[in-house]
Image (cartoon, rainbow, N blue to C red):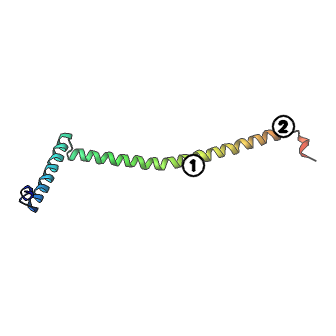
Amino acid sequence: MVESLRPSGGLDNVRAMDDLLQQTIDTAVASAAAEAGLGPATTANGMVFLLIAALGLLMALVYVPVRLFLTITARSRRLRLLQKIRRLRDDLGQPLGADQP
């Protein structure tokens, strides 16, 4: 009774099923691509988008460290300038004779 439930073709049936499955998948992918409008032009547009997105990412990776460096150095220059101005104001506030012993 168990023998009658087994497929009679054996390995050939498995290969036929694999081929049928692959053909069905290929047909489904092709029809989905056709419905979505994925032709050669759309693929080219996708490549252009990826290229521009990659360039934008590269620009951001360069810009952020440079901007941080410039901001930090500008703040340190500004701080040194303010400290120099404060020293000059303190020097101007003292009488002239105070510098000489």
Q: Earlier in the sequence, mark 2 or mark 1?
A: 1
Q: How many marks?
A: 2
State the image coordinates of residue 71 (x, y, percent, origin top left): 58, 44
Q: Residue at x 79, y 38 (%)?
A: 89
- Foreground disc of the pair 2, 1: 1
State the image coordinates of residue 5 (x, y, percent, origin top left): 8, 55
- The kind of residue tagged 1 is Phe
Q: Residue at x 42, y 47 (%)?
A: 57
State the image coordinates of residue 85 (x, y, percent, origin top left): 74, 41
Decide which of 70, 37 is in the foreground and name it. 37
- State which quarter of the image contains the N terminus: bottom left
Residue that label 2 marks: 93
Q: Are marks 2 and 1 in contact (CB under 8 Å)?
A: no
Task: Specify the quadrant of the image occupied by residue 8.
Answer: bottom left
* Mark 1: few/some/many CA within 10 Å (<14, 14-19, 20+): few
Residue that label 1 marks: 69
- The kind of residue tagged 2 is Gly
Extreme-bottom residue of the structure: 11
Q: Residue at x 66, y 46 (%)?
A: 77
* Label 1: which secondary element: helix
Decide which of 11, 28 is in the foreground and name it. 11
* Mark 2: few/some/many CA within 10 Å (<14, 14-19, 20+): few
The reply, left or right, for residue 70 in relation to residue 23 is right
Q: Residue at x 15, y 53 (%)?
A: 22
The reply, left or right, for residue 73 in relation to residue 38 is right
Q: Residue 78 bears which disc, if any?
A: none
* Label 2: which secondary element: helix
